[in-house]
Image (tube, rainbow, N blue to C red):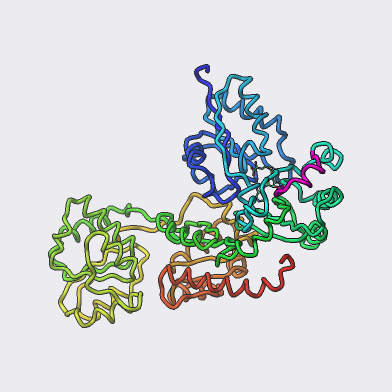
Amino acid sequence: MEKGKGKVYLVGAGPGDPRLITVRGQECIRACDVVVYDRLASPRLLKFLKPGAEKVYVGKLPDRHTMKQEEINQLLVDLALQGKTVTRLKGGDPTVFGRVGEEAELLYDNGIEFEIVPGITSAIAVPAYAGIPVTHRDLASSLSIITGHESPDKLDRSIHWDKVTNATGTLIFLMGVAKIGYIADQLIRHGKPPETPVALVRWGTRVEQRTIIGTLQTIEGIVAEANFKPPAVIVVGEVVRQREKLNWYERKPLFATRVMVTRARAQSSDLSDRIEELGGEPCEFPVIETREPANPAVVGAIETALRNADRYDWLIFTSVNGVEYFFGYLKKLGIDIRAFHKARIAAVGPKTAEALERRGLLIDVLPVIFQAEGLLDSLSESMKPGQCALLPRGDLAREVLPRQLEARGLQAVEIDVYETIIAEDQEEETLKLLVDGKVDVITFASSSTVTNLLAVMRRMGIEEPQQVLNGIEIACIGPLTAKTAVEAGLTVTIQPEDATIDALIDAIATARLTSRGITAKEAPEE
Ligand code: SAH
């Protein structure tokens, strides 16, 4: 290989769910300078790109045709000749109707190094996500993966209908939705029983997954009636019946549910993981980011407060961020937590308490109601006038707690150990999902996320963000957040009894199951 030339990774992106890419595939995305992708590869995989990496979309767009295969082949060569490391992301596996042969051949002809990274093909994974195993000890001992893309006469030349019909196995057609009638007719004509079960699974493994079931005889009508569009995998064979018992994915509580998470990026992963576990798709709109205060006066106040550690009778934490930044400053200033030996520790909310416990600090007071007001009630017995309390918090924290402590004769020292900023890196794509009505539930885990999301939407040109949001289920973690939402003109539809993330998720799951209970009856497909 010549020096100065780049390298191309031809990578299978898996069937859609971004977690179904291989470890090697993910490494290739992280390492590349430019990614070339199309619509079958999940855009959610692009978050693994290193900062500044270039994205080239070569798929279909409403206003232009797909880039021709020859142009894509040439593009890969050109990018590599510029010395770039290129990752060509292809849906499923690159060697299964992925035209990787043509791409790799031109790279070879141009002396460019390449690797093929296999992926999980939709032909197998998509049926599995619809509860259909492609082979079965008793029902199917072979598997054919067939293209349904060609025109009927070409199909007739490339498919040996008599042979596939008489194979004792499952037939999988890719790219065949438009030809479903023709495919079913040919199979019946060559001897497959008309009552052979057929499934079509659209956008499998993704939040958009939909499945319809019929027989060779009925499926064309069912597809037309449901207005069922590609991309879909077609499964023909007895294995389809397994779905009655094995349909594990579509039964999950958050199946087909896109949940928008509005928290700081560093904190949202917990919530996002839970959503994925329950079968939903999290989409993160990190409206808040936090950082250390920039103002020297604020920094000076933090330093003074922390250097007087032995003054305090109470250390009161109201957020996980407050804990994290507080310890950040202790480390920076070389202060040991034991300097606060006199202080008892209180936390608002179990997550805050957990963050402290992780650092070896057990909580003296944890309120029953997870709000500042609850803390005051729980504290009142042990608090004495004349005591001094340190409150490390964010700059947007509410004033209730310090004012009430003062009203009870305590001295409250507030330090803003972090500031809140509205995320700048703009989430155009996420916003588009919102505006296009593709978000099913939106979660607010604090009042400031409500205010900030509305502010970000206005700044991005949406004059009446309430109108957009009110078409969506709105889930608020607790009464204060809900109050802020209502005051901002939003209709809160989901609110758990306990103000915790776990309870919030449970409430969303319950609401979704209930609403699907109603729609399931109306859905024509099953
Ligand atoms: N290389 C790909 C297939 C490319 S051909 C793979 O291994 O999966 C494109 C066809 O794949 C589509 O027309 C559709 O039939 C199928 N397909 C790909 N991803 C799909 C998905 N998530 N859901 C349903 N069908 C899918």
Residue 11 in the image: x percent, y percent? Answer: 57, 37
Q: In this view, does 474 lie to the left or right of 398?
A: right
Q: Is residue 3 left or right of residue 144?
A: left
Q: Would residue 223 be seen by someone viewing this image from the given angle?
A: no
Is residue 456 or residue 27 the one in the foreground? 27
Identify the magenta region.
159-172
Q: Would residue 327 be seen by someone viewing this image from the given angle?
A: yes
Residue 203 in the image: x percent, y percent? Answer: 65, 53
Give the vertical position of 333 relative to 73 (above or below): below
Is residue 502 or residue 194 the one in the foreground? 194
On the image, which quarter does residue 346 sit in?
Answer: bottom left
Number of numbered discs overlaid on the protein picture: 0
Is residue 224 or residue 329 the one in the foreground? 224
Give the vertical position of 144 relative to 133 (above or below): above
Which residue is at a point 87% across and 39% down the rendered structure image?
153
Residue 148 in the image: x percent, y percent? Answer: 77, 44
Q: Does the magenta stretch include residue 491?
A: no
Q: In this view, does 73 lie to the left or right of 309?
A: right
Residue 10 in the image: x percent, y percent? Answer: 58, 34
On the image, which quarter does residue 216 sit in?
Answer: bottom right
Give the vertical position of 464 relative to 266 (above or below): below
Q: Does the magenta stretch include residue 162?
A: yes
Is residue 101 or residue 136 the one in the foreground? 136
